[in-house]
Amino acid sequence: MNIRKTLRSLHRDFGYFVVGITFIYTVSGIALNHRQDWNPHYSLISEELSVPVANRTDLTKDEILALLDKFEFNPLYKKHFVTKSGDIKVFVEEGTVIYSPEKGKAELEILKKRPFFFQINKIHLAQTRYLWIWISDAMAVFLLFVAISGLFLLKGKYGLKGRGLWLTGLGFIIPLTIILFFIS
Amino acid sequence: MKKSLILILGLSVLLSCSNQNKQKKEEKKAELVVLTVDELLAQGKDLVGKEVMVKGTVTHVCKESGARCFMMGSTEDLSLRIEAGKIGSFSQEQMGSDIQVSGILQEVKLEEEDLAEMEKAAAAGESANIGHALGHDGPKLHDVDGGKHDSINQNKKLEEINQQLAESKEGYVPVYYLEGLKLVQQK
């Protein structure tokens, strides 16, 4: 049995097999890397209303519904309670409304799932039940195999004894430098 | 091709078998008494490290990834942090919903040194929320997604904890949280 030939076949087939998951992990990886600049999971919709100043907080559900009707977004009521600071916090589908009777102001914040990104980020962060965790472990093993087998596919100056060695070394040096100098 | 397929299928079967065994083991667990947030916090000291079941209204879900949520009891002051753990994650849709969760109760003991450190951070205008002891994160962490509704007055919270510490016989303020195991019910 020719080991290099077998390795090449497995490298090729496993390589095809992991394309999908590599795509998911890399795209969501970029999205998550920049989470200080944007929320990769949700997009924000906000709306502010000016209403007459009032001094009572014991609003009925119907009165809250009447307030919600004034928003253009038309939020759907779930429940509400009065906070210690005297505001009324209303839970609506996908968000909240903070109504300050004393200030005569009501603010709506809705967080909508970003299609595609929300799902692939969940997968990337393994925020799922067990099944996906096992699948992603298996995929990681396949990916590792593809990476390691790739080292031994070529002979000669383009193989691990030549250019391959330099490029592989560089791939290790970059993260190691960050670890040594920037991560205590 | 054949070899590759056999390897891929073999590994998948192996993993799915071990997963099924794990799920069966979980189903065998004895049923737990469902506690309200108020009851759980009142009995917290005796329940640390044990599996408990708690129900309440979700008042906040971590916006970044749903890694944790906060559940409210009968008042705003009675709140419990739930780390998603084995539940995976919480979602913004659960805000305002009544949920029932099982998990292991954990305790963070806030001592004088912790409070001094927190006050120092607060004075420097930084987040003083060590171990989420003050509740959910402050508005600074939500700059990119609004977060006006998530503001916490950390100075006021620190004052309250200082008061509790002064009255404490043990010399610390316990902050309880749940390491989530299962989301049992939601409505």
Image (cartoon, coloured by chain):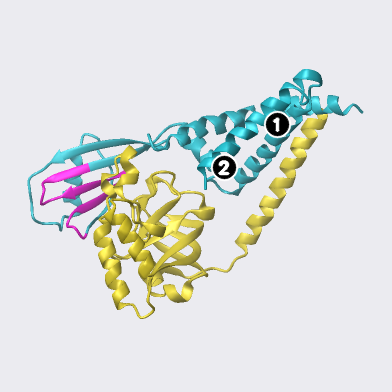
What residue is shown at x 32% (from left), y 55% (from top)? B121
Question: What are the residue bounds of the magenta stretch?
Answer: A84-107
Where residue A12 sits: x, y (%)? 74, 24
Residue extending furthest toward the bottom: B169
Where residue A144 sits: x, y (%)? 69, 36
Relative placement, left or right, of B131 versus A148 is left
Which residue is labeled 1 in the image? Answer: A147
User: How many marks are shown on the rendered structure?
Assistant: 2
| Quadrant of the image containing the N terminus of chain A | top right
- Callout 1 and callout 2 share a chain: yes
Q: Amino acid at mark 1?
A: Ala
Q: Amino acid at mark 2?
A: Leu
Distance CA(mark 1)–CA(mark 2):
24 Å
Residue A103 in magenta? yes
Relative placement, left or right, of B182 versus B4 is left
Give the secondary structure at mark 2. helix
- Residue A160: image quadrant is top right
Query: Which numbered disc flags the more N-terminal residue, 1 or 2?
Result: 1
Viewer-side residue, B94 vs B83: B83
Q: Which chain is cyan?
A: A
- The answer to whether mark 1 and mark 2 are in CB contact below 8 A is no
The nearer-to-camera label among 1 and 2 is 2
Q: State whether residue B51 is above or below residue B183.
A: below
What residue is shown at x 78% (from left), y 18% (from top)? A157
Q: State whether residue A119 is above or below residue B123.
A: above
Where residue A16 sits: x, y (%)? 69, 25
Q: Which chain is yellow?
A: B
Relative placement, left or right, of A156 versus A28 is right
Residue A55 in magenta? no
What chain does mark 1 sit on?
A: A
Which residue is labeled 2 in the image? Answer: A180
Give the secondary structure at mark 1. helix
